[in-house]
Image (tube, coloured by chain):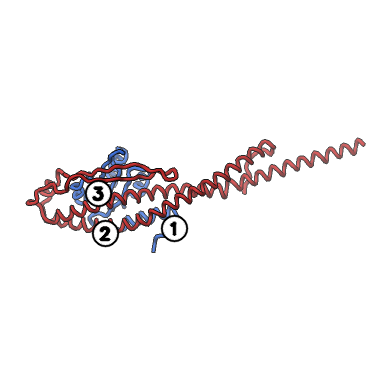
Amino acid sequence: MKTYHIAILGSKDAILGFKAIGVKPVSVTSKTEMLEKLEKLCDSGEYAVLLITEDFFAQGKDEVFELSKRPLPAIIPIPSHRGSEGLGQEKIKRIVEQAVGSDILDK
Amino acid sequence: MAKLNVNPTRMELLKLKKRAKTATRGHKLLKEKRDGLMKSFMSIIREAKDLRSTVERDLGEAFKNFMFASASMKTEALNESLAVPSQKMKLEASTKNVMSVNIPEFKSSVEGDFVCYSLASTSVELDGSLKTFSHVLSDIIRLAEIEHSAYLLACEIEKTRRRVNALEHVMIPNMEETVKYITMKLSEQERAAITSIMAIKDRLG
C-alpha cells in the first residue's frame, strides 16, 4: 500500500485551520487558478483525497466532475466557512440520478 | 427495424447467426453486471448521504469556532502559530475491483498532536475548533471513500445500462431481422430454381 496525502483547496481564511491537523492547504483565489491547481494535484499522484470548499466547487462543477473520473484522488466538496449551501447533497443527488434515473433518496 | 446491409448468401447467414448468438450472450452478461453494480451502489449510497449530513453539520460548527478564534487573534499571530504543524496524517490507499470498476479504499492514521503552538499566546477557541476539525477528518476520509466509490459506480452503471439497451433494442432485433430476410431470400431463390427446372422439363418432354 502506498501512502498518500490530503490537500484542501479554498480561500485562505477557510483552509488555514486544516493546516494544523496535517492537511496540506492550497489557497486559491479564482476559478482558473483553482482548476489549474486541482489538475496539478490530481496529476502529481501524491494525493488520495482532495477537499474543495463549496464556494469554489460551485464555480467549476462540471470540470471537477470530469477530473474525478479516476479512481484516485477522490475530490470531495466540503462546506466553506460561510456554512453549507447544500452543494454536497446536490452532488449525491446527481450521482443517484446518474445511476438510477431518478432521485430515489429524496423524501 | 432496419436490416443490416449484407449480401443474402448462405455464408453471411451463418456468420450472422453466430454474431446474434454472441450478442445475446453478451446482453445477458451485461445485464447481470448492471444488476451487480446497482446492488453495490445501493448499499453505499444511503450511508454516503447520511455521512455527508453529519460531516456538513460538524464542519459548520468547526468553521464557526475557527472564525471566532481567528477574530480574537491577530492574523500574523495565527499564521505564526500554525506555521509548523506537528500532526501528521498518514493515508494509505488501495483500489478494489468491483465488477471491473476500480474503487478506492482508504486507511488513515494520525501521528502526533494538533497542538503545535504555545497555549499562552493563542485563544481558547482555537483549541476547540482544531479539536473538532481533527475529529471530523476521519469522517471526511470515510465520506471521500464512499462518495467517490458511488460516483465511479454511477458512471459505470450508466455506461453498462446504455450497452444493455443498445444490444436489446437495436443490435439484436436488427440481426434477427437480417437473418429472417436472408432465409426468405434464399428459399425464394430455391423455389425459383425448382420452377424453372420444372418449366424446362415440361418443354423437353
Protein chain holding label 3: A
State the image coordinates of residue B74 (x, y, percent, origin top left): 10, 52
Residue B140 percent coordinates (x, y): 28, 51
Apparent side of residue B139 relative to residue B45 in the rendered image (left or right): left
Q: Amino acid at mark 3?
A: Gly
Q: Looking at the image, which is closer to me, B189 or B153?
A: B153
Residue that appears at 60% across and 40% down:
B19
Q: Which mark is residue A102?
A: 1
- Residue at the disc numbered 2: B57
Residue type at the position of mark 2: Arg
Q: CA distance from mark 3 to mark 2?
A: 19 Å
Report which colour depicts chain B: red
| Front in this rendered view, residue B95 or A34 | B95
Give the colour chain A carries in the figure. blue
Q: Is residue B205 above or below residue B28?
A: above
Q: Nearer the viewer, mark 2 or mark 1?
A: 2
* Three-letter residue code for mark 1: Ser
Q: Residue at x 76, y 40 (%)?
A: B189
Q: Chain of mark 2?
A: B
Mark number, residue A4: none
Q: Using the image, tell me which numbered label, if any, was put on residue A10.
A: 3
Q: Quadrant of residue B184?
A: top right
Task: Please say if the residues under marks 3 and 2 sit with CB atoms less than 8 Å apart.
Answer: no
The chain letter under disc 1 is A
Q: Secondary structure at mark 1?
A: loop
